[in-house]
Image (cartoon, rainbow, N blue to C red):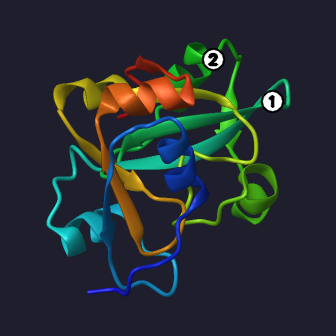
Amino acid sequence: MAQKQEKTNAMRQLERENVPYGVRYYECEDFIDGTHVADLLGLSYDSTFKTLVCTGKTGKHYVFVIPVAEELDLKAAARSVGEKNVEMLHVKDLKDVTGYIRGGCSPIGMKKPFDTVIDDSCLLFDEIALSGGSLGVQLTLSPTDLIRVTCAKTEHISI
């Protein structure tokens, strides 16, 4: 079991907004994919979500949150934010844009708020898991709280 770490920006934002959440720690020195994290923590792939950041044709950035074993449907994602198309943000730009690194990117507590869309499958669960804002940290919270704190909307955006 990993050692307890300092609070992340995501945790601080949840606490500021009085949102109940759980924290799960796991050993990790470098990026591992979300399915591996779910396996390490004994979590369902369907209720464990990953955060993806894209850039639209207009140059605007968007955040998409989908189940870890799924892929982002780029056409559906673009439609959901009113863009002609979106493409994944290059990993080298992730920290500058969001304040987070690959594998530790949370839709909560980014440098600034971005339009956020969460796959509507999140609504099937009382609680979902997602990155806590640092490698080795996973948060659990209700999808309705996640939607509220990120000012997100839900649509079917995964394949």
Q: Secondary structure at mark 2?
A: loop
Labels in figure, total: 2
Which comes before the other along the chain, label 1 or label 2?
Answer: 1
Q: Which of the 4 image quarters holds residue 155?
A: top left
Q: Does residue 148 sit above or below 90 in this rendering?
A: above
**Mark 1 → mark 2, Cα distance in angstroms:** 10 Å
Q: Depth check: give the residue in front, 32 or 106.
A: 106
Give the residue pinned by disc 2: 81
Q: Residue at x 42, y 33 (%)?
A: 146
Q: Residues within 10 Å of mark 2 (few under 14, many from 20)?
A: some
Q: Residue at x 22, y 40 (%)?
A: 127
Is there a contact, CB below 8 Å, between mark 1 and mark 2? yes
Rate crowding at label 1 as few (under 14), some (14 to 19) or many (20 or more) other CA atoms within 10 Å. Answer: few
The residue type indicated by label 1 comes to Lys
Foreground residue, 23 or 30? 23
Report the amino acid beneath label 2.
Val
Q: Is residue 32 above or below residue 85?
A: below
Residue linked to disc 1: 60
Label 1 SS: loop
Whether residue 130 is visible to the viewer of this picture, yes or no, is: yes
Q: Quadrant of the C terminus?
A: top left
Q: Position of residue 151 (x, y in %)?
A: 55, 22
Judge left or right: residue 83 versus residue 104: right
Q: Residue at x 71, y 17 (%)?
A: 84
User: Residue 62 in the image: x percent, y percent?
Assistant: 67, 33
Q: Is there any visible trace of residue 33 in the rendered image?
A: no
Residue 54 lies, in percent from the top left, at 67, 40
- The location of residue 16, given as percent across then percent down, is 55, 41
